[in-house]
Structure formats: C-alpha cells, structure tokens
C-alpha cells in the first residue's frame, strides 16, 4: 500500500533570484499579468482546491503521512493562513500519528512569532534556503538575505519547538572558492540543524543566469569543480554526524525528510497549487502553471489539472530505477532486467556500486557513483 | 534570320552543311545561358517550353549551375547566306575531374567557342580545355560574354584572349547570352569559321562515343559522332575496345528532344540505343563500327577511366547499408568512372570504399546518393592511390590508409599532377609559398596580360585533395583558379599516421602523409578529437603514432560528475524524459574499445564539408 503525501505550492517571491526557474512570481509580475491573485487572496483558493480534490476521490481513505509547503517562498503567506491550509488538509484527509509537516522558509521573511504560530499550528519541520554564506556567491545568485540571518532563524525555530530544521545549500557557483564553501560549512557546523540539502548550481534555460552565461559575463559552472565541492561537503557533513541518505541530502539519524523519501520511493502525493505535480498509482498529473489560470479553474469548481501521463510499465520501471538509485537504502536488484543487471555488475567493478550491498541484492551508490548516478541510471535501464 | 522550314533529315545530310562545335567556358561564365539562347534563336524550342539551362538534365546540374554530362543538340540554322545549316552543339563538362570526357567531346568537334566572362577573364580550367582544343586542332572562336555587365572590361580581356590564342583582339566577339545580344552573329561566325566535317561516306563505319547516359526506360543512350560511313537502325554494331556486338534498336538526333531516324550519317552527331543496361558496355572514347563490315582501325584515344581519389562512404544509420549498396549499383549504371567495394570500419561499421575521378566527382556522387536515394552518409577523408614497394620487391596498391603495410618498405609512390594556376599577379608570392609547403615544383610561369599570371606546377595529388582549393582561394581572395591533370607518380617519404583512442587504433582516422607533416596531422587530429569526444568515466589518452612511435598525445580527462541535483517539485517525468533522451543519444554512440564516441564526433572529425564547399566555390 502506497502512502499518501501532499505538496502545497506557494508561487510567490519577494524578488526573483537570477538562477531560479521555479514556478514563482513577484507581486509586480502578477499585477502586470493582470491577475487579482495575491498572497492575501491565495489561501482561500488553496483551501477550495483541497476540498475539491477530496470530493473528487471520496473512496481514497488514506490519511496523509507527510505534507510539504514549497515555493516560491511559503513564508510570504501569513503564518496563520499557512496553518489554515494545513488544517484544511487535516480536516479533509486526516493525518497519520507520525505526520511530518515541512515548510520551506526564507530566513528574511519569517519572524520568531511566525515560527511559533507555525509550530503550534502543526508544522514539525522547517527548511531554510541559506544557499551560501559568501557574499559574492549570494550576489551572483541574486539572493537578498543577509547570511547571518539564517542562523538567527534556525535558533528561533528551535526555540519555537521545531523538531527538525534543515538548510539548503547551493555549491559550485562560478566565483565560489573552496574557502567560501568552507566558511558556509563552518557556520552549518555550529548551527542546530539535523538536515542539509546541497545542490550544485544548474544553469536553467530561460533564467537571467543563463542569459548572463550566454553573454559570457559569467563562466559556466564546472562539473569538475562541483565534484570537488561535493567531496568537501560530504567530508565535512560526515564529520558532523550528518550522513547522506539521498544523493543531495544529508541527515542526522531520524532527521531524514520523509516527504522527500516518499518521492524517491515513488509513493503517491497530491499536488496543490499552480504547477504542482501529483502522483497516484502510476499516473502523474500536473496543474495549470500560471496562478491566474489555476485560480480560474478552482473558482469554477473544476479540476486544475493541465495534463496527465499514465505511465507504461517500462516508464514505471525506469522511474523506480532512477529514483531508487539515489537513495542510500539503494535499489533492489530484482527491479533490473538482464542487461541492467549485467551493467550493475560492471558498475561494481568500475567502483560506482558498493560490492557488499550488491552481494546482498541491492544497488547502492559508492561515493564516486553518487556523482555519476545519471549515467548509471540509463545503463541500469538496460 | 528565319526558322529553317524544311531542315535536312538526319542520315541524309550533306556534311558540307554540318558544323560540329562546342563551348569551352568556366562555370558561371554563361555557357548554359548561351546554349539556351541558341535553342531559342534557331527556333527548335517553343518559347512556351523554354526553361533556364534547358540542356542540363539532372537537378544537381541545374541547381549548381554546372554541367556534369555532355549532350549534343542539333540546331537547324538559316545563316546570313540564306542557306540552311545543321549546327551540332556538343555540350562539354566544365570541371577538372572530367578532363577525359572533355577531350572526347572535343574530338567530336571541328570548332570550339571559347566563352569568357567579360568581367572576370579566362580561368584556369578554361585555359586547360582551350589547350586541349588546340591539341585537337579545333578552330577557336573567341567570345566575351556578359558585356552588358557594368563590371565588364571587354577591351582588357579581349587583349588577354588575343595574347593567349594569338589572334587580333578585334576579332574577339562580344555577346550577352542573357539578353541575346550578338548571339545570332556568333552562330553565323560558327558557320563561316568552323570547317565542315570531312569523312569517307563509303568507308566502314566509325563513330566516336563521346557520352553515354543511362535512362531508366530506354537503357543506355550512347552519343556518337560519325567519322566515316553511317550507323543505321536495326543493324549490329561492334564496340572496338571489347569486341562486343549489339543491335541498334534506335538511332537518331537530339533536337532538343530525341528524334529517331533511319540512320546517322558521316559527319553527323546523334544517339544510338542498343538496350544495354550499363554504361560500361558503351564507354566514352570507344569506337563504334558495324559488325558486318567492321573498320580495321579504331579512332584511337580510348582510355579506361582511372579513379584518382578514394573515400569510404558509410551510412549514418548502419541499417541503411543494403540501400547504399543498391543506390551505388544504380548510380554505376550511369557512371563508368565510379568504382566501389565493400569495406568495414571499426569506427563506422559497414560501408564502401569508393573510387572517383576527383573531389568534385566524389561530391556529386555523394550528393546524388543523399538526394536521390535519401541516404545520410559519412564520408572519410579522401585519399589518393599509393603504390608501395616492399624491400622484398612485392608491390602493394593502397587505396585505403588501413591497407598501408607495416614491415620493411622500400619505396612509396604517389600520384602527381601537373597543375595550372591563373592568378592576378599580386598573389604570385603567396601561391608560390602555398605550393612550396605542398611539395610543389614550379615548372614555369607566364604573364597572360600585365596583371594576370599563369603558373605551372607539379604537385602531389594528395596535397590537392587535402584542402588545397580552400587555401588557394583564401590566399588569393577567391581570384585564383586551378586546373590539373595527372602526370605520373613520384616516390616520396610517406608514412601512415594512426590515431589511437585509449590504445585502440581508429581506422577511420588513419592517414598517409609526408613524414614532415605527420606531426602536424597528429597534433591537429588529436586536438580535434579531444574537443569532440565527450568525457568518459575513465581517462582516455588520444595518441597519434607512426608505427609504434607516438608523435602526439592529448588526454580526455575522466568525467567526475553527471548527476543532476534534484527533481524539482516532484516533476519526475521531466527528469525521466531527460535521462531517456540522453540514453537515446548514447545509442548513436559507437564503441571504440571501451570508449563511447558519438557519431557526430566522427562526422565532424572526418568532415569533407570543406571539400564540398570548395568544390562548389570553384
């Protein structure tokens, strides 16, 4: 039986960061697009969509085991409103006893009072987008927060009673030095976090960053540098007792993000809000992307789904391999076909898969394998 | 002038009223346009049916504005003296690769129009063909075309032509093929100046084959010039080079569509169809006689076409191999010079090693394969034929670098060409420098006019095959022109350079080069491949080696990271599709040992597109 999770998308940001291609909008952009959707009018629509989704599938009696508020910047919405949305989910679906509720937060846009409201309202986990402590890197990323703000916010979150606190890092930005990263990790090491996500900077098409790279103002991030930085991160975090459980995620024991794991294990989840993706037993669907288009559907009381994809058996197998291989718990070799298994065996010889786990029937990435996982996925598909 | 009312019938035309002539011109100097105008003026093409470059049959010819195969058209013409004449215009190919075909077309004529662009002056190929025409004792009628152009310099170029052929500049005719200005006068000059054919109508028949074309419906159509006697329909003819006999199912003339007749007579130009299916059975340069009463002696000058340049042709998609074979088999029916045999390459799979008359011939064949047969092809860098003599006296003919023997080599012989370069005098220095680096030997130079020079060099053909045109064009801002003809061979210090990828030789990249240039080739190729081959999980050395001796080395460092950080917002499909697309790309990779090489890398490294471009630019 698959577990059920919910992802709630909050498509607002105070400003757009140069590297970001997420489905998010500034107030000015929304105004320019001629929509009445704002951070203030948004929560009602979200609640409506939750009600609609529940009515659409009355027969599904699974309680939610994780909820994740992502963005955009969820904390641009009033904390009480976030709690109201969470409450709507609880009313409609019910929560399992060990419910995990995460919100992403910008260190700038959350006060101690907000954190208390969130915690009291049922949020258990908070993830701060810190990215880097180096001013030059933050400038390149066009991040607005003051680096020191993250650590205050983390301390406030702990005071408010959050059980799990995470920081997001971005590494490998052009101009970042080993020393810049070391400084960031130094600060992480004294912060009270039980989880770190670290992503290498990807230049996504259509972003301001991509345009600057194309104009030659900024060099393309180098994979070699990123690999080296990943090594620095792994070493440092391990020494802090944070262990990798997914290619880009490290946690202290019990600090793993169960919502993320649900994705990697290919569980079911609801997608709520514009552009949100959902998965239900082999069908993937996604909502209309623009908040105005999405809201119009919600207001009409019809599905906000833009399109869906019913996965073929081969797609499911591909996804199981692609997702499962990223986890430290690994991928059962029984998922692989004959040629995939041959490739897995070769990959053990190449140092990409752990030999002990392989003997035990699992494909588990070695350190080197974690950096070369995408190529290996394609090989294991057979 | 008026259209001929009752033109003389083929097979019953007095040789005295026949004029057989051709047009010698450089590409773009307006030969086809002039031919079009002649068709119109003589009234044999209805104006409603007129289209540009009427005589060029193949699409490629019309698009590139060049004529690959010659053809003959019979033009009845009422001259100024009010007599009706029969003008046979024999169209000649205009490119260096087809010198032999040109020479046979010339041999079918008594006169030639030397057509020169009044804005550009004479070009090297034209000059070479002019010399051929003079050797054949043809009457030359010099003509400047495009005199309507603002850039035309008729006086200057008339003087130049007069200097070359030794005539009075005043006698150079000035026409505009585009507007038709002066074309009728030109036809009258042809009547006046070109001698009528002289042959013995009673002697055993002898006809020169100057072209041979395969037609899907009719089989091979053979174009002949009757020298002696006559060739009737429904008679047995004999090919004098092979002794093969065939029946003439049809004979006739082209005017400008085929018109069959009872016979073609002495001095006439026409076609014959025997039902043979392969142009090799009816070869250009051969003599046709009648089986019942054969001539004793052939007209002479017959020569088998000799492929000078070889290249491997491979289908991009390996499963197209049978289609490629079929396509070559079909092209061969119409191309007596094309030779090919199956070849296997580690890098490129199954393909064919093909022999061509030259680079343009190669490019034309390749383009026809791609266009008419819808094939995507890779062609390996073209190379010439080497004759390798071993110390034990054994001789090996090498048409593919991979056949170059190891072991004790006594001598390597390479084909040489005698080349003519025409250039504005300011570039003489740069050309000398270029030819020197290409192992050229200056034979002599002449000033055609104050500022134009004819330079004569012997050069190894291999040097010309390797981007010589490009260099010549760029060093002379496009002003120089080149022509060459084979002139034997020389022995040279030639070595084979192999390219090794992770220790495995890649056959497609081996090249035979002069020892002095081996290092440059190795360094350049290794650097090129380093840029083209994606990083692998392990370090990949690229080496260039002569035998066991490594002369250049590059290293592709191992890839360290390919993983994308995250699946944003649960968009799993996007990531899956991205990886699936990458995997599709991998399928097109070729394995060289353990190294995955994208097809594109081979294509880019082997690209003969430069050659194509320069062949077109010529």
Image (cartoon, coloured by chain):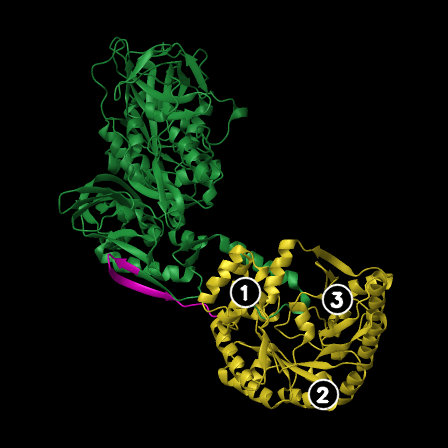
Chain colours: A yellow, B green
Q: State the image quarter where residue B362 is shown.
A: top left
Q: Residue furthest left?
A: B392
Looking at this view, is B202 or B116 the one in front? B202
x and y percentages locating residue B266 in the rendered image? 30, 13
In the rendered image, the vertical position of residue B247 relative to residue B26, given as above or below: above
Residue tagged 3: A271
Tell me, yes or no, whether the two marked residues, 3 and 1, touch with CB atoms within 8 Å: no
Which SS class for mark 3? strand
Mark earlier in primary sequence (3, 1): 3
Residues under labels 2 and 3: Cα distance? 26 Å
Q: Tell me if A233 is positioned left or right of A39 in this view.
A: left
Q: Residues within 10 Å of mark 3 (few under 14, many from 20)?
A: many
Q: Residue at x 16, y 47 (%)?
A: B411
Q: Nearer the viewer, residue A334 or B44?
A: A334
Q: Quadrant of the C terminus of chain B?
A: top left
Residue marked by disc 1? A374
For the question of whether residue B334 can be seen, the reply is no
Mark 1, secondary structure of its residue: helix
Alpha carbon distance from label 1 to label 2:
36 Å
Q: Chain of mark 2?
A: A
Quarter of the image where one finds residue B19 = top left
Between B125 and B605, the one lying in front of the other is B605
* Residue positioned 75% across, 78% down in the render: A98
Residue B489 showing in the rendered view: yes
Q: Are circles 1 and 2 on residues that touch, CB within 8 Å?
A: no
Is the N terminus of chain B in the top left, top right, bottom left or bottom right quadrant? Answer: top left
**Is B477 placed above or below A298 here?**
above
Secondary structure of the magenta portion, mostly? strand
Q: Which mark is residue A157?
A: 2
To the question of a shared chain for discs 2 and 3, the answer is yes
Which quadrant would residue B28 be assigned to in this image?
A: top left
User: Which mark is first along the chain, 2 or 1?
Assistant: 2
């Amino acid at each position: 039986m698959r577990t059920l999770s919910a992802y709630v998308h909050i498509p607002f940001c105070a400003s757009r960061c140069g590297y970001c291609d997420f489905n998010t909008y500034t107030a000015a952009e929304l105004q320019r697009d001629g929509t009445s959707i704002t951070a203030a009018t948004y929560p009602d629509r979200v609640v409506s969509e939750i009600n609609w989704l529940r009515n659409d599938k009355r027969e599904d009696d699974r309680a939610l085991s994780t909820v994740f508020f992502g963005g955009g910047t969820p904390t641009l919405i009033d904390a009480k409103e976030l709690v109201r949305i969470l409450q709507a989910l609880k009313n409609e679906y019910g929560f399992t006893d060990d419910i995990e509720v995460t919100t992403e937060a910008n260190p700038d846009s959350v006060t101690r009072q907000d954190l208390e409201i969130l915690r009291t309202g049922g949020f258990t986990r908070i993830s701060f987008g810190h990215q880097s402590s180096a001013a030059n890197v933050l400038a390149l990323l066009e991040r607005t927060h003051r680096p020191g703000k993250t650590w205050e916010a983390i301390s406030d979150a702990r005071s408010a009673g959050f059980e799990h606190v995470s920081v997001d890092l971005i590494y490998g930005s052009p101009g970042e030095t080993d020393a810049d990263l070391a400084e960031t990790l130094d600060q992480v090491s004294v912060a009270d976090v039980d989880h770190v996500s670290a992503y290498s900077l990807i230049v996504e098409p259509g972003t301001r960053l991509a345009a600057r790279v194309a104009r030659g103002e900024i060099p393309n991030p180098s994979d070699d540098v990123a690999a080296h930085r990943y090594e620095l991160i792994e070493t440092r975090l391990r020494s802090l007792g944070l262990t990798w459980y997914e290619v880009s995620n490290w946690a202290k024991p019990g600090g793993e993000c169960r919502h993320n794991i649900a994705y990697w294990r290919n569980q079911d989840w609801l997608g709520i809000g514009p552009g949100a993706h959902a998965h239900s037993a082999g069908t993937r669907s996604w909502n209309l992307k623009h908040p105005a288009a999405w809201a119009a559907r919600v207001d009409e009381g019809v599905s906000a789904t833009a399109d869906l994809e019913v996965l073929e058996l081969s797609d499911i197998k591909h996804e199981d391999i692609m997702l499962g291989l990223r986890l430290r718990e690994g991928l059962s070799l029984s998922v692989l076909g004959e040629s995939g298994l041959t490739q897995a065996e070769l990959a053990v010889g190449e140092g990409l898969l752990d030999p002990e786990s392989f003997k035990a029937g699992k494909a588990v990435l070695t350190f080197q394998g974690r950096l070369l996982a995408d190529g290996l996925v394609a090989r294991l598909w057979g | 002038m008026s259209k001929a009312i009752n033109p003389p019938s083929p097979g019953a035309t007095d040789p005295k009223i026949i004029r057989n002539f051709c047009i010698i011109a450089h590409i773009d100097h307006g030969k086809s346009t002039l031919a079009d105008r002649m068709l119109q003026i003589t009234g044999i093409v209805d104006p409603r049916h007129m289209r540009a470059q009427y005589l060029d049959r193949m699409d490629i010819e019309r698009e590139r504005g060049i004529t690959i195969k010659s053809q003959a058209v019979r033009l009845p013409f009422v001259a100024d003296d009010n007599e009706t004449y029969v003008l046979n215009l024999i169209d000649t190919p205009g490119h260096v690769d087809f010198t032999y075909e040109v020479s046979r077309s010339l041999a079918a004529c008594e006169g030639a129009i030397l057509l020169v662009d009044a804005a550009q002056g004479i070009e090297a190929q034209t000059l070479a063909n002019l010399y051929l025409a003079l050797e054949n004792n043809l009457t030359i009628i010099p003509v400047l075309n495009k005199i309507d152009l603002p850039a035309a310099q008729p006086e200057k170029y008339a003087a130049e032509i007069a200097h070359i052929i030794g005539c009075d500049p005043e006698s150079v005719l000035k026409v505009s093929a585009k507007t038709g200005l002066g074309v009728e006068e030109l036809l009258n000059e042809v009547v006046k100046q070109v001698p009528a054919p002289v042959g013995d109508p009673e002697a055993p028949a002898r006809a020169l084959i100057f072209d041979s074309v395969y037609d899907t419906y009719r089989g091979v159509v053979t174009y002949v010039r009757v020298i002696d006697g006559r060739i009737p329909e429904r008679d047995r003819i004999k090919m004098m080079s092979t002794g093969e006999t065939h029946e003439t199912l049809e004979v006739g003339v082209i005017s400008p569509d085929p018109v069959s007749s009872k016979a073609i007579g002495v001095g006439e130009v026409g076609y014959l169809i025997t039902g043979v299916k392969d142009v090799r059975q009816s070869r250009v340069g051969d003599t046709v006689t009648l089986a019942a009463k054969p001539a004793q002696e052939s007209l002479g000058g017959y020569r088998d076409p000799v492929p000078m340049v070889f290249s491997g042709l491979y289908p991009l998609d390996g499963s197209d191999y049978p289609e490629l074979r079929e396509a070559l088999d079909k092209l061969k029916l119409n191309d007596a010079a094309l030779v090919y045999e199956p070849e296997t390459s580690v890098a490129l799979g199954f393909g064919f090693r093909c022999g061509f008359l030259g680079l343009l011939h190669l490019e034309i064949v390749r383009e026809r394969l791609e266009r008419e047969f819808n094939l995507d092809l890779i062609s390996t860098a073209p190379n010439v034929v080497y004759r390798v003599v071993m110390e034990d006296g054994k001789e090996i003919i090498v048409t593919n670098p991979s056949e170059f023997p190891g072991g004790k080599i006594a001598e390597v012989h390479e084909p040489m060409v005698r080349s003519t370069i025409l250039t504005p005098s300011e570039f003489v220095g740069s050309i000398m420098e270029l030819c020197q680096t290409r192992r050229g030997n200056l034979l002599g130079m002449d000033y055609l006019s104050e500022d134009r020079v004819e330079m004569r060099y012997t050069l190894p053909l291999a040097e010309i095959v390797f981007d010589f045109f490009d260099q010549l064009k760029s060093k002379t801002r496009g002003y120089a022109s080149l022509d060459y003809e084979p002139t034997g061979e020389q022995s040279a210090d030639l070595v084979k350079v192999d390219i090794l990828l992770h220790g495995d030789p890649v056959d497609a990249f081996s090249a035979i080069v002069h020892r002095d240039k081996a290092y440059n080739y190795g360094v350049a190729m290794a650097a090129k491949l380093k840029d083209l081959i994606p990083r692998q999980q392990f370090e990949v050395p690229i080496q260039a080696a002569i035998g066991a001796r490594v002369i250049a080395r590059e290293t592709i460092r191992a890839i360290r990271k390919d993983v994308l950080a995250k699946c944003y917002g649960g968009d799993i499909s996007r990531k899956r599709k991205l990886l699936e697309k990458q995997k599709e790309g991998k399928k097109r990779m070729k394995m060289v040992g353990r190294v995955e090489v994208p097809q594109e890398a081979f294509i880019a490294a082997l690209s003969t597109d430069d050659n194509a471009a320069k062949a077109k630019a010529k």
